[in-house]
Amino acid sequence: MKSETPDRRHTQRRLSPSLFIDYFVYLLVRIVEEVLNILPEPTGMAAGRFVGRLVYVLFPDRREAALENLTIAFGRERPRDWIVRTARANFEHVGMMAVEFFRIRRWSHDEIANRIVVEGRLPYNLIMNGGRHGICLLYSHFGAFEVGAALAKLLGWDVHLIVTGLRNPFLSRYFFSRGGEGTGIKTYPHKGIVQNMIQLLQQGAMVAFLGDQRGDAERGIFVDFFGTKAPANEVFARLAIEGNARVLPLATYRRDDGKYQSVFGEEVVIEPTGDRVTDLTTVSQLFHDRFEQWLRMKPEQGFWLQRKWRRKPSKKRKTKNGPGSPANR
């Protein structure tokens, strides 16, 4: 029997049927992008809202996650009908975000300047001119956060952006070019790059990240979020602490007049104590305090589709952790 060389096996793996499917999906996405950029903006945004409503109806798991999150966050303050209305509006918001993602990549500099209203210049100027230090640009899954890529182009930033890759290698590579041409944005996969980002911050670079991602309960870093304990991803607090960076919060949300409001918040002041768990918890709490402020301002522009406080039980996780593990309690 003739044996296969490693090169031959590698080629066969690269040319697997799943790779062709991935490429076909990538081509479909590119076609959708072209269509969305040909359509007038009101039509494109209306299409995004319609798709969002379809997802609300056709994907009960995502709908239940949004309703659960909103109930945990606002159930003590708001009636059930408000929560349902907000969930529906939130799905429409996510649909519009998908349209924005493709359209903003082609905005000219003049269009960016006309569409984005920047608020909070004082905190921005103070932190940018405060000496040689790294800067953590603190985002969350709130508002039109993808428009932040256009803002980076407008302000001439050189920013290192931490993003979550996709299983489809073609889409992942394409989506990594977050801001389109003419930006100083460099993207990095979220896995295995913490130490590199810390070194960049120590050298005075700017690193941007979505700091509200859900953490693992097993790691024991919890924050108070809307009055309920939630596991926090401590990696982002670690970047700020070990990178000796200053933290500048930035929220961008959609306005009713078709423009976008980008608000620079006051600097998040970090005062490490030297106790690792205490510091990670304290800084994560400071971050989540900002996230909650933003969500209370425009709750329909959150990203409630993914469970923040607890995961949906799964057979795989139960088998891995066992019935008595902390993750399943």
Image (spheres, rainbow, N blue to C red):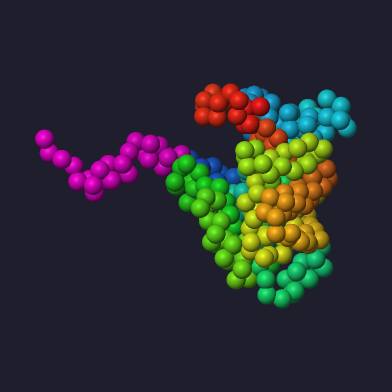
Quadrant position of residue 85:
top right
Please name the residue shown 67% across and 41% down the image.
220
Please name the residue shown 68% across and 75% down the image.
132
Q: Which residues are magenta?
A: 1-25
Please name the residue shown 62% across and 31% down the image.
327
Magenta region includes residue 79: no
Does 25 sit above or below residue 88? Answer: below
Tell me if I can see residue 171 in this picture. yes
**In-image side of 302 versus 18 (left or right):** right
**In-image side of 35 versus 133 (left or right):** left
Rendered location of residue 329, percent (x, y): 66, 27
The quarter of the image holding the N terminus is top left
Magenta region includes residue 14: yes
Rendered location of residue 178, percent (x, y): 57, 55
Q: Nearer the viewer, residue 99 or 83?
A: 83
Does 186 sit above or below residue 59? Answer: below
Please name the residue shown 53% across and 61% down the image.
196
